[in-house]
Image (cartoon, rainbow, N blue to C red):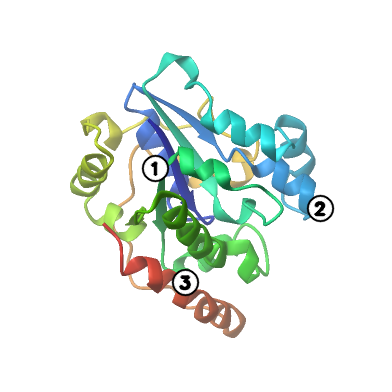
Amino acid sequence: MKIAMWSGPRNLSTALMYAFAARGDCAVWDEPFYAAYLAATGIDHPLRDQVIAAGETDAARVAQACLGPIPQGQSLFYQKHMTLHMIPAFDRSFLAGLTNVFLIRHPARVIASYSKKRESPTLADIGFVQQAELFDQVADFTGAQPLVIDSADIRANPRVRLTRLCAALGIPFTGSMLHWPAGPKPFDGVWASHWYNAVHASTGIDEPEGPLPSLSARDQDLADQAMPYYQKLAALRL
């Protein structure tokens, strides 16, 4: 099975990738389209040149690899995708050949976390619009509603929620998904040194989050813009 997990940044996406990698039967791929996205858009991100140098900039080749043989002889292939990387210029028909899941998080939490790493994010940077669009496209391609999971639910009860996700995917849950060793992982993208310091300090999925963070007026306006897209998928979450 090839699982494509679609989220915006700062959505618990790296921790969830670590959880699947810890299964022992699952190869993982960290943000396959990142280099292609940066090369195609010219956008400036931390470690931009290193990301492009380390990755594949031809989106068609990336899509082929997503559909290709599962690496390392494993039975599962978990692909951690960022919704913002799937720009309109990239052919999305490959999505029909994957098991697509959508990972969501409340916009206020995403923006508060993202702003600590990259200043003044825009609506396009945080991926909510693209996520809703991709959700609709996958539903059209497959004729079925894709799975949706919320990071808050997972953090509230990792064992129960991951068990439920695995059941929905038709794969067994294993308790090894709940723990991993601290530190960098060999499958981390080269951008990990900028973005992954918190998850590198972790050995499992974090405790439940507290109250929503307070935002500046600018960031609150951005959260308000993102909310309808979040709410659309939140209403359908597993």
Whether 196 is drawn above or below 237: the answer is above
Q: Amino acid at mark 2?
A: Gly
Gap between marks 1 and 3 measured at Cα: 22 Å
What numbered label is drawn on residue 155? Answer: none
Gap between marks 1 and 2 measured at Cα: 29 Å
Name the residue rendered at 51%, 44% in the picture: 95
x and y, in percent, of residue 197 in the image: 53, 44
x and y, in percent, of residue 45 in the image: 73, 52
x and y, in percent, of residue 238 in the image: 26, 57
User: SS class of the residue under badge 1?
Assistant: helix
User: SS class of the residue under badge 2?
Assistant: loop
Q: Amino acid at mark 3?
A: Tyr
The one nearer the camera, 165 or 216, is 165
User: SS class of the residue under badge 3?
Assistant: helix
Asked if the residue under mark 2 is in contact with the one under mark 3, i.e. CB atoms within 8 Å, the reply is no
How packed is label 1: few (under 14 Cα within 10 Å), some, or many (20 or more)?
many
Name the residue rendered at 22%, 30% in the picture: 174
Whether 5 is drawn above or below 79: the answer is below
Which residue has dot 1 on it? Answer: 16
x and y, in percent, of residue 150 in the image: 34, 58
Whether 8 is drawn above or below 80: the answer is below
What numbered label is drawn on residue 42? Answer: 2
Name the residue rendered at 49%, 41% in the picture: 80
Could one spot residue 103 in this view of the protein?
A: yes
| Label whose residue precedes the other's in the sequence (1 or 2) | 1
Picture quadrant where residue 181 is located: top left
Q: Residue furthest top?
A: 73
The one nearer the camera, 237 or 135, is 135
Picture quadrant where residue 212 is located: bottom left
Number of numbered discs visible in the structure rendering: 3
Name the residue rendered at 42%, 51% in the picture: 12
Q: Amino acid at mark 1?
A: Leu
